[in-house]
């Protein structure tokens, strides 16, 4: 019997629907080539829905999404909606509500893609950031006092629990072992200043490390991580860190791997439903022009398949992307690819079908 996966689709805002279309095109090609099927259900949430209805997340949607095998998201962010409303109301609520406590961000420079780092190539830029995704400064703890006055006080608290920290660290060790490359895990923190939070992170890190003698461990402050990602990115294999630092260093990672157009991400609940998305945002200035790069969405689809248990199809998608970048696509920036958004999807879907059975 053909295995069927229920995939919830959230096209979202701006160019989100355009890149989602191409990601689904490639997913369908992989399904046909590798003997499974997809049942797609689309949920039209985002800025347009909010402006029409005043509703950020429809009632019951988290319960509905929790029944899916995976969620495929385009982008959230609308130029006519105040920043923060959609991001917190949709993205953070989904991550927290579905307990997607890992943000997984591969940082891979593919052959044929330019990096701004001098004298660095694909062999030097190949690591993964495991970001804690449900606590820290993004937990929403804090408040204001005397707002709008000269005596205003604003407090934003970083929440770090032993449970939350340890499960993130344990996932990172397991992922590093499964990745099976350099087998080195680096803790990124700020133990010299953020002494309470990162004392917990550091203690948990080395306590869990005792269970993984095959994994080399080290530590670096977040500012040093940023310097070494630019100067010596080849030092890194897997990096584990908290929510805020992970948010920052993964954007730097996107730039050194060639740009947001190829930066994929996954919000992972290893025991539940996970959500996959390109990290570049909605890019509203390119909406409807057919020039946005869909490869980040396509690589997010690859992460989706790998996570739900279709590793051969996932490998086929990444191989197809590599082939397109090596031989066909001139530049990964919007409008400079030499192909339209839809043509890139066609190209990669075709390569997936050609490569089936290799």
Image (cartoon, grey):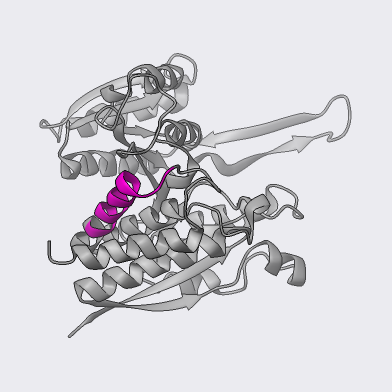
Q: 236 or 212, which is in the foreground?
A: 236
Rendered image quadrant of residue 142: top right
* Up/down of 328 relative to 249, above or below: below
What residue sits 48% from the left and 64% below the top? 342
What residue sits 39% from the left and 52% below the top? 266
Residue at the extreme right of the image, as rendered: 149
Main secondary-structure element of the magenta-colored stretch = helix
What residue sits 22% from the left and 34% below the top? 208
Residue 3 is situated, as x and y percent measured from the top left of the image, at 23, 79
Q: 81 or 336, which is in the foreground?
A: 336
Q: Judge from the rendering whether residue 332 lies leftward or rightward of residue 205; answer left or right.
A: right
* Up/down of 201 relative to 135, above or below: above
Q: If the image is split into quadrants, where does the N terminus sit?
A: bottom left
What residue sits 34% from the left and 67% below the top? 27
Residue 90 is situated, as x and y percent measured from the top left of the image, at 59, 58
Taking the magenta stretch, the answer to whether it contains residue 320 is yes
Observer able to see residue 118: yes
**What's drawn in magenta, residue-wise?**
316-330
* Up/down of 90 relative to 254, above or below: below
């Amino acid at each position: 019997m053909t295995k069927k996966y229920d995939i919830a689709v959230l096209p979202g805002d701006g160019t989100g629907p355009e890149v989602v279309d191409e990601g689904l095109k490639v997913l369908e090609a992989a399904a046909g080539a590798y003997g499974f099927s997809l049942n797609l259900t689309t949920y039209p949430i985002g800025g347009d829905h909010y402006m029409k209805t005043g509703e950020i997340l429809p009632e019951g949607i988290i319960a509905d999404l929790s029944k899916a095998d995976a969620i495929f998201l385009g982008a959230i962010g609308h130029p006519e909606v105040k920043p923060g409303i959609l991001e917190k109301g949709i993205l953070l609520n989904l991550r927290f509500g579905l307990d997607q406590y890992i943000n997984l961000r591969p940082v891979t420079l593919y052959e044929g893609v330019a990096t701004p780092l001098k004298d660095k190539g694909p062999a030097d830029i190949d690591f993964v950031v495991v970001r804690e995704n449900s606590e820290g400064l993004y937990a929403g703890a804090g408040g204001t006092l005397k707002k709008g006055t000269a005596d205003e006080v604003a407090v934003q608290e970083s929440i770090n629990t032993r449970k939350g920290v340890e499960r993130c660290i344990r996932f990172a060790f397991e992922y590093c072992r499964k990745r099976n490359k350099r087998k080195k895990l680096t803790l990124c923190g700020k133990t010299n200043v953020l002494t309470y939070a990162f004392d917990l992170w550091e203690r948990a890190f080395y306590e869990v490390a005792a269970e993984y003698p095959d994994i080399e461990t080290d530590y670096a402050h977040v500012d040093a991580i940023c310097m070494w990602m630019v100067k010596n990115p080849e030092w890194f294999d897997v990096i584990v860190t908290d929510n805020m630092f992970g948010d920052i260093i993964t954007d730097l990672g996107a730039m050194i791997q060639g740009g947001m157009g190829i930066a994929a991400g996954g919000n992972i609940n290893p025991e539940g439903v996970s959500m996959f998305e390109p990290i570049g945002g909605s890019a509203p200035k390119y909406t409807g022009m057919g020039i946005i790069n869909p490869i980040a969405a396509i690589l997010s689809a690859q992460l989706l398949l790998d996570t739900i248990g279709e590793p051969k199809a996932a490998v086929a998608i990444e191989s197809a992307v590599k082939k397109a970048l090596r031989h066909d696509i001139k530049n990964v920036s919007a409008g400079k690819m030499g192909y339209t958004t839809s043509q890139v999807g066609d190209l990669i879907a075709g390569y997936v079908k050609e490569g089936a059975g290799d």
